[in-house]
């Protein structure tokens, strides 16, 4: 098993079990961080690079996580997404995807949607299983083109989301899986946007949905900025009030000392007057 939990190759006719990182590894620690922050419901925090962590390790663990999510989501649709119902891999009437991996299939070919997803998932898993790309040993270096490979993986996984939303969303709703689909896709969009991993042109088939997710993020950022400004202002006012209070306390002490001095001076003066009279 590799550092990022990639196991044996998947069956082309079925979808394999979810892959996880081995216990005790850096991959397992980062995977745990993902699921702990996912539990908080704040996807904005989920996608951020944890302080002190390596960017490539973070990209690697999340890539495996996204592969698992898409794998499971599409796996629920395999009996509905068939060569008959989906003879081409598309995302609506304007976008069609053809398969080529540059090795076994060098020129793009037109295939059915399930065949395209089979090719895609097999290709992704080969990348994840390749220890020269996804190192198996802790501390082993990532290749120089690692981030380019991650971009290609995520770009192709996006196409599965695009096909699901355009061709099978009604079925997703009937299976009561739309909330899970939307959460997974929102997580995917926020992560790829955070690290600029997918070109805007590739997002065109789901442009309106992506825009709504990003606008919601902008609104949240504005709210958080306003909240931060209010908190800063409150702290400033609190600091001023504390300073004023301290000044009043000091001034009060100075008055006490002053009146004690005046009182002592008057007593001394009276004493001197009495002494003179006695003389």
Image (cartoon, grey):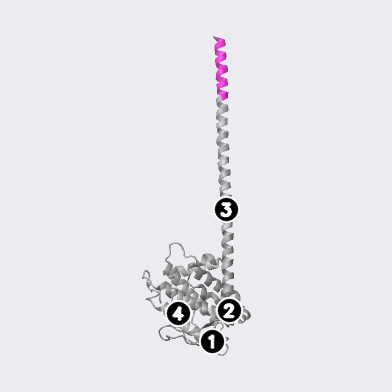
Q: Nearer the viewer, residue 234 or 99?
A: 99
Quadrant in the picture for the N terminus? bottom left
**Mark 1 nearby-residue class (10 Å; few <14, some 14–19, many ≥20):** some
- Is 245 positioned to the left or the right of 199 in the image? right
For label 3, the residue is 231
Q: Are marks 4 and 1 in contact (CB under 8 Å)?
A: no
**Mark 3 nearby-residue class (10 Å; few <14, some 14–19, many ≥20):** few
Whether residue 93 is situated above or below residue 147 in the rendered picture:
below
State whether the magenta stretch is mostly helix, strand or loop.
helix
For label 4, the residue is 124
- Disc 3 to disc 1, how far (Cα)? 54 Å
Q: Going from the N terminus, do you reach mark 2 or mark 4 first?
A: 4
- Disc 1 to disc 2, how far (Cα)? 15 Å
Helix, strand or loop at mark 4: helix
**Residue 111 is a magenta residue:** no
Q: Are marks 2 and 3 in contact (CB under 8 Å)?
A: no
Whether residue 253 is situated above or below residue 235 in the rendered picture:
above
Q: Going from the N terminus, do you reach mark 3 or mark 1 first?
A: 1
The label shown at residue 165 is: 2
């Amino acid at each position: 098993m590799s550092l990022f939990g990639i196991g044996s190759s998947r069956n082309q006719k079925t979808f394999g079990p979810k892959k996880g990182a081995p216990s005790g590894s850096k991959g397992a620690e980062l995977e745990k961080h993902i699921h702990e922050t996912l539990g908080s419901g704040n996807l904005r925090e989920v996608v951020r690079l944890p302080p002190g962590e390596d960017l490539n390790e973070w990209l690697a663990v999340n890539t495996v996580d996204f592969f698992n999510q898409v794998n499971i989501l599409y796996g629920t649709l395999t009996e509905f997404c068939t060569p008959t119902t989906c003879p081409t891999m598309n995302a609506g009437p304007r976008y069609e995807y053809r398969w080529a991996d540059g090795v076994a299939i060098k020129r793009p070919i037109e295939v059915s949607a399930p065949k395209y997803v089979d090719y895609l998932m097999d290709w992704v898993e080969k990348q994840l299983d390749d220890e020269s790309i996804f190192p198996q040993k802790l501390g082993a270096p990532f290749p120089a083109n690692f981030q380019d490979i991650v971009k290609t993986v995520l770009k192709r996984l996006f196409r599965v989301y695009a096909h699901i939303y355009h061709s099978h969303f009604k079925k997703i709703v009937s299976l009561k899986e739309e909330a899970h689909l939307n959460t997974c896709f929102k997580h995917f969009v926020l992560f790829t946007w955070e690290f600029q991993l997918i070109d805007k042109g590739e997002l065109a088939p789901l442009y309106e949905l992506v825009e709504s997710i990003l606008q919601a993020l902008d609104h949240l950022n504005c709210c958080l900025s306003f909240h931060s400004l209010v908190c800063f202002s409150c702290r400033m006012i609190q600091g001023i009030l504390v300073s004023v209070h301290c000044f009043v306390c000091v001034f009060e002490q100075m008055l006490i000392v002053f009146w004690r001095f005046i009182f002592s001076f008057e007593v001394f003066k009276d004493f001197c007057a009495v002494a003179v009279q006695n003389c």
